[in-house]
Image: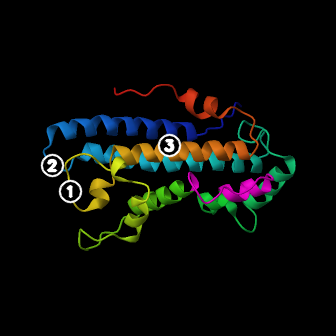
Amino acid sequence: MVSVRDYLASQHLWTARREAWLCRTREKQLVADSNGNLDRKHRSYATTAALSSVAFLEGVVNASWQDAFDEKSTVYTDGIPESALATMRELWRGTEQYEWKALLEKSQAALELAGSERMPNRDPYQSVKVLIRLRNALVHFKPETRRPDTDADLEQRLKTKITKRRENQAPIGHPWFPNKALGAGTAQWACDSCIEFARQWHQSMGLTYDFDDLYLNSTGAFEVE
């Protein structure tokens, strides 16, 4: 019987990039209209881009760990030292259950096992760390009552990345999160940060397959249907 092995990282990245493009196109329309109302299409595009960008990273890192565990020689393991693959195999579903570890912890542990340095605490690592906080806030959203001119911890962290240049340019006001935070600038920042993180991780792991061919060129163009 023929068996099939699916990988979704490239699909998540395609989705993130397409939604970022849609968000930019929609935002330009909203700026031109200047009606100041919440636009659910626009917010949906920004939200999906952020969620799918992190899902892409999860898919990239998990593919190498899972293929190591299943002893598969694939583009997600080729180039990783055999000693590293053996240890990844033990840890994935061993006593420490790396299968359920957080994304950044899994990615850093894999680098150490491959004999590389951990990703430094600067961009793109820092941006991805903030983006994961945003993803968690959106997925596990809890309403809260507060003054619109005060910043919560997440907002403070986001504002180090979502500067005025990246803010939602549509004419919608307070509160800053989510009204100004979720826009085309954030959507593109999410895509760019995750692509750069994945690229650096891919190279540092010693993976031999060309990153662009695997994740960017293979997804083709994205257009509005």
Badge 3 or badge 1: first in the primary sequence: 1
Alpha carbons under labels 1 and 2: distance apart: 8 Å
Q: In percent of the image, x 24 and y 47: which residue is there? A: 40
Residue range highlighted in magenta: 107-125
| Residue type (three-letter) at the residue carrying disc 3 | Asp
Q: In percent of the image, x 50 and y 41: which residue is there? A: 12
> Is the Cβ of the residue at disc 1 closer than 8 Å to that at disc 2?
yes
Q: Which mark is residue 194?
A: none
Give the labeled residue for mark 2: 36
Q: Which mark is residue 192?
A: 3
> Could you tell me which quadrant the C terminus lies in?
top left
Decide which of 97, 167 is in the foreground and name it.
167
The image position of residue 185, as x and y in percent, is 37, 45
- Per the image, is 119 magenta? yes
Q: In percent of the image, x 48 and y 43: which residue is there? A: 191
Decide which of 198, 61 is in the foreground and name it.
198
- Per the image, is 118 magenta? yes
> Is the Cβ of the residue at disc 3 closer than 8 Å to that at disc 2?
no
Badge 3 or badge 2: first in the primary sequence: 2
Badge 1 or badge 2: first in the primary sequence: 2
Name, please, the residue furthest toward the right.
Answer: 83
Left or right? Give the position of 166 relative to 136.
left
Give the labeled residue for mark 1: 173
Alpha carbons under labels 3 and 1: distance apart: 26 Å
Name, please, the residue furthest toward the front.
Answer: 164
